[in-house]
Amino acid sequence: MIDRVACKKITVAILIALVAFLLSFIPFTLTQSLLVGVIAFLVVLWTNEGLPLGVVSLLPIVLFPSFGILSTGLTTQHYANPIIFLFLGGFFIAIAVEKSSLHKWIANKMFSIFPATPRGVIFSLTISSGILSSLLSNTTTALLLIPIALFISDDVKLKMRFALGVAYGASVGGILTPIGTPPNLILFGFMQDKGMEAFSFIEWMWMMTPLVFIMFIVVASLLSVGVSDVKISLDDEEKALDANQKKILLLLGGVILLLLLNAPLGSFWGGLGLNESVVLLSGGLLLFAPPFSILDWMDDKSKVPFRIMFLFGAGFSIAAAFSSSGLADEVASYLLALTNLSTILILISIAVLITFTTEITSNTALISVMLPIIYALAIQANMDVKLFMVVATVCASYAFMLPIATPPNAIAMSSGAVSVKDMLRYGFLLNLAGIFFVVIIAELFWR
């Protein structure tokens, strides 16, 4: 039962969300205005935690059809997006890693390279996550590293910082290669469609390395503020792996190898053509069957964060509503009024718009809508087309404030160590830092 005090808090939280809904109407069509209001309502409830995360994440199924934004069928189909099953498969593997205590062995190995202090762990997790994310998907990387990050310390505040280090590192490092994140691939496909000369793999990495290096330092330094340099003690005794740990390590190695071989390398290697969701879900399901038989559905199903799967569904349905209502095109068209500004101001405007819009919609959907508009903007203003499209693409991956912004953010939330308020506090500062450094490097280096 909920006591009267808790009931009052929930009521106040919902009333605040309703006020946000009423104040968020915009001078567009009725459907677009209602969509903005519903999004404001959801974001406020996610932020003030007036209702459970999973409950709020299911509200689009009720609200979108009720307000005529999306039909029930179109809304619910986004709750079965393939990336949700990528997440499910990865989480099965993560549960098995924790259940077998394999994460303790991995953490000990990691500490043989990096300093065993809170600051050292934050830097090592951020950089390791970023480097892996440049080759694997940021979702997969976060799923593999979060269990390790949570094991390292029992301190609640450190767990939060470690989990955010993994999530933010995955987003920062994903832009390092053309294959690291979907918006990069969309940019390359768009350039090919327009007959533009695409960046080579090495050229892209050369451009992105300074930004990624700086953002690694910014993320890890921000998360390290206020932590002491007390040594974190782990079990230093080198223990042999047991049978279950060896099985999981073998499976984990096989999954990572498949994912690496599946990644195309420009004209050198076209990849295996496998779907990452299928690879990761297959690996997770194998853990229930012989010869592994490590997971048991009745015992382990409670550890699966279904509320985060609903959160993904909410994010994808919001992205679909943005496109179907024409709101994305409407917002993007306002950029055409910026052509009279200086180059640096246009870059800042694009960076701010993309970064903060990405917080409430899929970066893949957003960049798909925005690239044609930015291309037209640059052509009309007789400016560097590639420069503006690259800035937009990078900013689409640099969203740090809300769990629906990127899969790594959602995975960090699923750990239970991170609250929306924590993510907002650090994420807002990192959004500003990302905008600043992207624009500065674009102006001084990419041009």
Image (cartoon, rainbow, N blue to C red):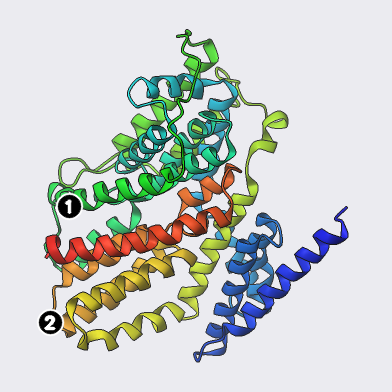
Task: Return the mark for residue 175.
Answer: none
In the image, is residue 220 above or below residue 49?
A: above
Q: Residue at image x 52%, y 73%?
A: 321
- Who is closer to the viewer here, 438 or 118? 118
Q: Residue at image x 68%, y 77%?
A: 18
Residue 306 spot, x, y in % from top left: 64, 47
Secondary structure under badge 1?
Answer: helix
In the image, is residue 252 above or below residue 159?
A: above
Work out whether residue 96 can be spotted.
yes
Secondary structure under badge 2?
Answer: loop
Q: Amino acid at mark 1?
A: Trp
Badge 2: residue crowd in 10 Å (few <14, some 14–19, many ≥20): few
Quarter containing the C terminus: bottom left
Residue 107 spot, x, y in % from top left: 45, 24
Residue 289 spot, x, y in % from top left: 59, 24
Task: Return the mark for residue 204.
Answer: 1
- Who is closer to the viewer here, 313 or 99? 99
Q: Residue at image x 46%, y 29%?
A: 230
Residue 334 sits in which quadrant?
A: bottom left
Residue 287 spot, x, y in % from top left: 56, 26
Judging by the rendered image, the residue that carries numbered circle 2 is 382
Work out whether residue 192 can be spotted.
no
User: Disc 2, disc 1: CB below 8 Å?
Assistant: no
If you read the primary sequence from the N terminus, does the residue marked by circle 2 or circle 1 appear first? 1
- Who is closer to the viewer here, 293 or 389? 389
Badge 1: residue crowd in 10 Å (few <14, some 14–19, many ≥20): some
Q: Amino acid at mark 2?
A: Asn
- Distance, label 2 to label 1, CA atoms, is 23 Å
